[in-house]
């Protein structure tokens, strides 16, 4: 798959997730087979003000390439400047968030607030294209509309293409649905039909079969996976294998899941510092340990761990539950 000048190794992408898709998470996703990874959303205004925290969040490792940075915002000068900063930091691609339903983001006129105002939406894309100086493709992440009664898919995708976007990712749920409920396959299919640039589908892809369903019902050029990848990075490789061979690889064993969590903790400690890196991974325990006997007690132990060693010891505790059925 090609996006502007960037060739991807495959058409499966890791979704941007605030507070989750940091550099260690993205490295784990690449190792699991993702063809493109995204940073979490960053404020264009904060970046343009050169907020050190925000530029710190843009740090990435070479092995994450190809990599896209995602921004949100509506101040055109800030958007243009942040695109320039992102390009100069060596990112392969820029993505603009037009789907975030969070009140704080909407209040700052970013994210899905721009879906209410097509002119500003176009202007933000055009400012990003200017800031990227033709050296980095600009892409957008949108929704079909604010509510099911307000489906404006074709308007959004045509306007994005006309303003210079080179790929459109569509999370097939309306803004009013936040992140749950049915995915509107028909809206994604209409997006695919309305433009020449690649359209990537997102929402509810958690397995080989949901990936196949998304592809067959929408005709999309690529797939983006969010929550399905948390604690299960091999999902990318399994989906790729299934789409090619129509045969399933086995899901990771308990031992493999625990080993993956430990490796994630090692990378996280390396990147964020030992204590912070371990603590930040506590919130992913429910994903990593889902359905495993002894998950509850192991989670409690993880929540006390402040070093990689204590974290690993807490995880090893799960093997004591070999024959017991969890009482959760
Ligand atoms: C915790 C969390 C954080 C998210 N943060 C972002 C974000 O920073 N930028 C963005 O475009 N979407 C964000 N999303 C939305 C996801 O990128 C994705 O569109 C959504 O989760 C649907 O995909 P899924 O069903 O595969 O999870 C977030 C979703 C979750 C659950």
Image (cartoon, helix red, strand yellow):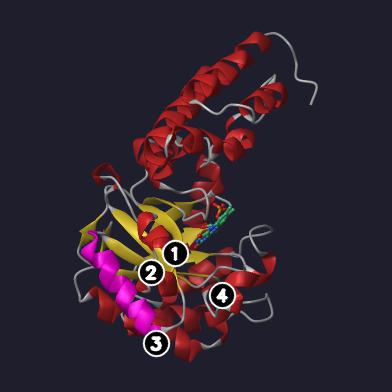
Which tag is nearer the camera, tag 1 or tag 4? Answer: 1
Q: Is residue 78 above or below residue 317?
A: below
Residue at x-position 34% and y-position 59%: 68
Name the residue that disc number 4 marks.
Answer: 112
Which tag is nearer the camera, tag 4 or tag 2? Answer: 2
Name the residue that disc number 3 marks.
Answer: 123
Viewer-proximal residue among 328 and 159:
328
Say whether residue 203 is visible. Answer: no
Q: Secondary structure at mark 2?
A: helix
Spatial CA span between label 1 and label 3: 18 Å
Spatial CA span between label 1 and label 4: 14 Å
Is 291 placed left or right of 208 in the picture?
right
Q: Position of residue 162 (x, y in %)?
A: 34, 85
Name the residue that disc number 2 marks.
Answer: 47
Residue at x-position 37% and y-position 55%: 56
Query: Which residues fall within the magenta stretch?
Result: 76-90
Q: Position of residue 176 (x, y in %)?
A: 68, 70
């Amino acid at each position: 798959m090609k996006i502007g000048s960037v060739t991807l190794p495959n058409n499966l992408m890791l979704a941007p997730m605030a507070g989750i898709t940091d550099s260690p998470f993205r490295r784990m996703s690449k190792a699991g087979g993702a063809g493109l990874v995204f940073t979490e959303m960053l404020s264009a205004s904060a970046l343009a003000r050169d907020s050190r925290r925000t530029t710190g969040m843009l740090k990435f490792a070479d092995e994450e390439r190809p990599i896209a940075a995602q921004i949100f915002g509506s101040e055109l000068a800030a958007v243009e400047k942040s695109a320039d900063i992102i390009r100069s930091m060596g990112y392969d691609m820029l993505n603009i968030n037009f789907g975030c339903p969070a009140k704080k983001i909407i209040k700052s006129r970013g994210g899905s607030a721009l879906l209410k105002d097509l002119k500003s939406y176009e202007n933000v894309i055009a400012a990003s294209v200017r800031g990227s100086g033709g050296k980095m493709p600009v892409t957008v992440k949108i929704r079909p509309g604010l509510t099911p009664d307000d489906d404006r898919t074709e308007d959004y995708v045509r306007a994005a293409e006309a303003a210079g976007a080179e790929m459109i990712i569509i999370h097939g749920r309306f803004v009013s649905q936040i992140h749950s409920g049915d995915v509107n396959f028909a809206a994604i299919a209409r997006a695919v039909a309305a433009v020449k640039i690649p359209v990537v589908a997102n929402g509810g892809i958690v397995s080989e079969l949901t990936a196949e369903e998304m592809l067959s019902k929408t005709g999309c050029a690529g797939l983006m996976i969010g929550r399905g990848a948390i604690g299960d990075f091999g999902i990318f490789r399994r989906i790729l294998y299934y789409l090619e061979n129509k045969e399933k690889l086995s899901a990771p064993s308990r031992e493999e899941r625990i080993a993956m969590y430990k490796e994630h903790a090692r990378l996280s400690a390396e990147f964020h510092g030992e204590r912070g890196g371990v603590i930040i991974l506590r919130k992913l325990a429910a994903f990593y340990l889902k359905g495993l006997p002894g998950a509850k007690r192991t989670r409690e132990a993880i929540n006390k761990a402040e070093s990689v060693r204590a974290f690993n010891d807490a995880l090893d505790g799960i093997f004591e539950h070999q024959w017991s059925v969890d009482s959760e």
